[in-house]
């Protein structure tokens, strides 16, 4: 539940439609900064890859292969079309997590705005088990607002969201395109419940609330 009035929410929706930007892509540079700063990594997996933007970014850090999976065939087709023909190290597959996650091990696993669509414990366990020793799991997730901290971050995000939309679309004659993703639904699990299960399944995890209605999770295998 949000404390933002409906009238303001509708106004924000109209502004965002005219000045679109991708909240998930905003975190892609941050995700890359979580990877070890050493020689290229071996294999990477992007769960819920959408149109493949993050998978293609990961390819610059990976020596062997990046695998992107998504349950939507249309989106996977878009990801393949958007990937250069000579990018042999990037592949996409139609698959649904957690059961459809290809066997690893992977040096890097990423999952952006997908975990709230999936069974939490089962998915975390599957991701953990497919991570190579010393590998890195990075999640950008969504949680249901419940606490005063959640609502405060939501309120702070509103003016920043407007500013980002204006800056990213400044000088454009038409709105910038936003990466194609599957149809989403609102999260029904609170951050507190997610944190409890994450810390039980991934001991030593780094978990933080973030702006723009997201939280982040980093775990080293």
Image (cartoon, rainbow, N blue to C red):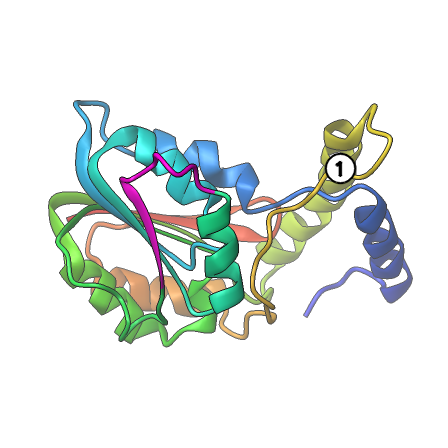
Point 16% across, 59% down: residue = 130
**Corner quadrant of residue 41:** top left
In the rendered structure, the answer to whether residue 81 lies left or right of residue 15 reads: left
Q: Please state the horizontal and vertical placement of residue 194, each as a whole percent of the image.
A: 40, 66
Q: Provide the residue span drawn in magenta.
A: 83-93
Callout 1: SS: helix
Q: Nearer the viewer, residue 90 or 42?
A: 90
Residue 74 visible in the snapshot: yes
Point 59% across, 67% down: residue = 184
**Corner quadrant of residue 150:** bottom right
User: Vertically, is 16 above or below 64?
Assistant: below
Which residue does the numbered mark 1 point to in the structure image? 165
Q: How many numbered markers are drawn?
A: 1
In the orientation shown, which residue stands out farthest toward the left?
133
**Corner quadrant of residue 64:** top left
Q: Please state the horizontal and vertical placement of residue 99, each as a whole percent of the image.
A: 27, 75
Residue 142 visible in the snapshot: no
Q: Nearer the viewer, residue 25 or 215?
A: 25
Q: Please state the horizontal and vertical placement of residue 193, each as a whole percent of the image.
A: 41, 70
Point 52% across, 60% down: residue = 75
Q: Magenta residues: mostly which secondary structure?
A: loop
């Amino acid at each position: 539940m949000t404390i933002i009035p409906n009238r303001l929410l509708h106004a924000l929706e109209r502004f965002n439609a005219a000045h679109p930007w991708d909240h998930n892509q905003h975190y892609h540079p941050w995700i890359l900064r979580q990877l070890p700063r050493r020689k290229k990594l071996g294999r990477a997996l992007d769960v819920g890859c959408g149109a493949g933007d993050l998978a293609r970014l990961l390819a610059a850090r990976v020596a062997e292969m990046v695998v992107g999976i998504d349950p939507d065939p249309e989106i996977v087709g878009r990801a393949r079309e958007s990937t250069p023909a000579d990018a042999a190290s990037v592949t996409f597959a139609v698959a649904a997590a957690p059961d459809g996650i290809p066997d690893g091990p992977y040096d890097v696993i990423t999952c952006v705005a997908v975990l709230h669509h999936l069974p939490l414990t089962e998915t975390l366990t599957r991701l953990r088990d497919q991570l190579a020793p010393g590998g890195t799991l990075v999640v950008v997730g969504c949680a249901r607002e419940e606490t005063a901290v959640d609502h405060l971050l939501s309120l702070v995000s509103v003016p920043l969201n407007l500013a980002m939309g204006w800056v990213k679309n400044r000088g454009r004659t038409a709105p910038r395109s936003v990466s194609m993703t599957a149809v989403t639904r609102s999260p029904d699990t609170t951050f507190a419940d997610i944190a409890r299960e994450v810390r039980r399944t991934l001991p030593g995890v780094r978990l933080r609330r973030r702006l723009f209605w997201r939280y982040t999770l980093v775990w080293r295998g």
